[in-house]
Every structure is written in structure tokens, then in C-alpha cells.
């Protein structure tokens, strides 16, 4: 093979120091990789539900959350924390929810038009994370609430003389529950 300066075959696997590139992966790929080595199922379940809401989600996220959990800290709150979001991003996110178009938003924005458009992509991503964090996780099944075994209200089925009244005694099979004042109970 003849050496050709800058040819793709010689540059494969190398990076030009003058042009650094940032590796980015799809969050689903990162989550699949985490599942392949993760020991803590509660952290994996949390990441499945909220990986779209976690800023800078990466393989390091799992290890960081695992360390926080072992230390007894509130690891879920830390994962969803947005305290490092710039105030401009929060302002634009608020304007995005309040107004229908950019013309109206720019009227109320506190900085320049250029600044608005520079920060807007981050504000949109911030809103998407907030929506993902607020929505319940999908695919987790139904939440089962145990039914109470005792009746919620007690009904006095005694007649005026104090004797028990059966439903068949009313004639039509329907009877009303009345209080001491004679008015129906609700």
C-alpha cells in the first residue's frame, strides 16, 4: 500500500489534535450497557424511567448514583437536580410555556434577540427533561391499591321501633338510608 498523506486508512482510529470530537451515544445504548454490568436493580429501574430527564446521562451516571446510595444520600434527587441550569435557560423555558411564538417571547425576554436564540436549544432540552421527570414511567404495569375489607360507611338498617329491617320488607327491593333527622345520608 502506498502512503498517501491524510488518507483515511492511515487516520482510522486516530484523532486530529486540532479538531477534537466529542463522543455522543444514544441514551438507550447507554442504558443497555448499564444493564449489562449493573448490580443494583433499583438504580437500573430509576434510570429506565428517568434517563431522558437526567442531564449529561452517561455510564458514569450509574456509578455516581451507586456511590451516593451507598453513602446514604438522596441519590434520586441528585440525579434529577437542575441547580446548574443557567438563569437564562430557565427564563426562556418559562417564556416557551407562556407564549405561542418567538415574537411574543422576545418582547418579554430580558436580554438580546441573539442571546435568546443562542440559549433556546438548551431551554428546549431543559423543558424536555422536566416533562420526562414529571411523567410517570411507562411500562411499569399498573399500580395496585389494596381494597379495604371493612365498609367505608355504616348503614343503620333498623326501623323506627329499633327492629332490623330487611331489604325485602320495603316491598320494591329498594330502600333509602336516612339519618336521625329523616333526611337522606350522603
Image: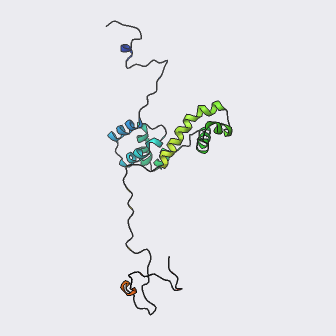
Tell how many labels: 0
Left or right of residue 168: residue 85: right
Q: Reply above or below: 184 against 139.
A: below
Q: Position of residue 113 (x, y in %)?
A: 65, 32
- The percent position of residue 131, horizontal first and vertical second, equals 50, 45
Q: What residue is shown at x 63% (from left), y 32% (from top)?
A: 115
Residue 90: image location, x then y, percent: 59, 41
Up-down relation of residue 154 to residue 163 (above or below): above
Seen at 52% across and 82% down, the residue is 183
In the image, residue 58 sits, relative to residue 146, either above or below, namely above
Residue 111 percent across, percent down from the top left: 67, 35
* Type of colouring: rainbow
Q: Nearer the viewer, residue 166 or 136?
A: 166
Residue found at the far front of this picture: 172
- Residue in the picture at 35% in, 39% down: 32
Residue at (38, 87) in percent of width and height: 169
> With respect to residue 125, does 20 lie above or below?
above
Amino acid at each position: 500500500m502506498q502512503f498517501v498523506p491524510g488518507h483515511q486508512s492511515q487516520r482510522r482510529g486516530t484523532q486530529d489534535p486540532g479538531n477534537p470530537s466529542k463522543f455522543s451515544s444514544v441514551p438507550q445504548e447507554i442504558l443497555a450497557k448499564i444493564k449489562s454490568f449493573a448490580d443494583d436493580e433499583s438504580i437500573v429501574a430509576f434510570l429506565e424511567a428517568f434517563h431522558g430527564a437526567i442531564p449529561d446521562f452517561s455510564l458514569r451516571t450509574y456509578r455516581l448514583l451507586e456511590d451516593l446510595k451507598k453513602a446514604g444520600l438522596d441519590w434520586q434527587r441528585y440525579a434529577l437536580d437542575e441547580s446548574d441550569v443557567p438563569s437564562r435557560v430557565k427564563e426562556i423555558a418559562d417564556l416557551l410555556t407562556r407564549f405561542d411564538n418567538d415574537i411574543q417571547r422576545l418582547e418579554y425576554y430580558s436580554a438580546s434577540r441573539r442571546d435568546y436564540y443562542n440559549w433556546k436549544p438548551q431551554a428546549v432540552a431543559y423543558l424536555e427533561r422536566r416533562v420526562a421527570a414529571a411523567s410517570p414511567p411507562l411500562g411499569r404495569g399498573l399500580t395496585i391499591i389494596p381494597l379495604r375489607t371493612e365498609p367505608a360507611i355504616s348503614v343503620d338498617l333498623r326501623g323506627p321501633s329499633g327492629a332490623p329491617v330487611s331489604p325485602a320488607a320495603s316491598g320494591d327491593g329498594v330502600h333509602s338510608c336516612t339519618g336521625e333527622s329523616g333526611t337522606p345520608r350522603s
